[in-house]
Amino acid sequence: FSRLMAIALLNFADDKGFFILNIPVIRGALFPFEEDSTNVRGAIQDLSRIGYLRTGKSGDGKDIGHIVNFSKHQRIDKPQASKLEGLEVEWTVFQEHSKNTPGAFPVGMERNGMERKGKGSFSAEAEEIYKAYPLKVAPDKAKAAIEKALKRVEFPVLLEAVQAYAAARKGQDPAFTKQPQGWFNDSRWLDDRATWEPKQQSGKPAPKINGFTADYHSEQRITNDDGSF
């Protein structure tokens, strides 16, 4: 598995070999059918030990990975500048989280690769998906529904669907946007996406009452010439 990880990271990293070291995101992007993050974390540790990559934390708190001899393994014809290369990073050997490691996730709090910090906290995947959802209400219930949804659908697939739904609802009346808890519990990412778009006016002429056109988009009352209704 560590050999597979070494190859997969060549495509995951930027053109200078740097990448954000987020275990759940790496698992979702590279090994979406893995049940949890254990193998991914172990492979990162193996590759760090043998010097294939180095890991550390930047000044702003980001976990960073870097494939040390990236250019020897991957040839980039037109390399793009790296946003991570210029960061000041304190490089250390990657340590697998354990019960006794400061800041490690408590035993029993990792589920399907989604590390949780304790009661009331949610995985990085759930937080990112909730952030992308167009309606922010009942966050704890919404994120709990997202966690359940992630048992049925892979993170990249669900995130892309949420982003598409948010794009479809942009600029629309939020009253007609689905509540997030129900959207995820009902597997609405499987909907026909055409139904997410705002409904167009039918183009049918408004009905007439006593020869006058009824305007249902205002609260004005229709009167006859003599002032009667």
Image: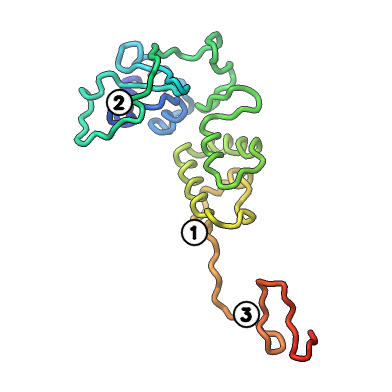
Q: Nearer the viewer, mark 1 or mark 3?
A: 3
Task: Specify which label sits upstream in the sequence, 1 or 3.
Answer: 1
Front residue of 69/44: it is: 69
Q: Residue at x 64, y 55 (%)?
A: 175
Q: In what element is the residue under mark 2? A: loop
User: Which residue sits furthest bottom?
Assistant: 226
Q: Residue at x 65, y 82 (%)?
A: 207
Instruction: Check disc 2: other Cα within 10 Å, few if <14, some if 14-19, many if 20+.
Output: many
Circles 1 and 3: CB distance less than 8 Å? Answer: no
Relative vertical location of residue 163 with respect to residue 24 in this rendering, above or below: below
Task: Specify which label sits upstream in the sequence, 1 or 2.
Answer: 2
Disc 3 residue type (three-letter): Ala
Q: Nearer the viewer, mark 1 or mark 2?
A: 2
Q: Is residue 186 visible?
A: no
| Residue 194's disc number | 1
Q: CA distance from mark 1 to mark 2?
A: 39 Å
Horizontal arrangement in the rendering, residue 95 relative to residue 73 (left or right): right
Instruction: Check disc 1: other Cα within 10 Å, few if <14, some if 14-19, many if 20+.
Output: few
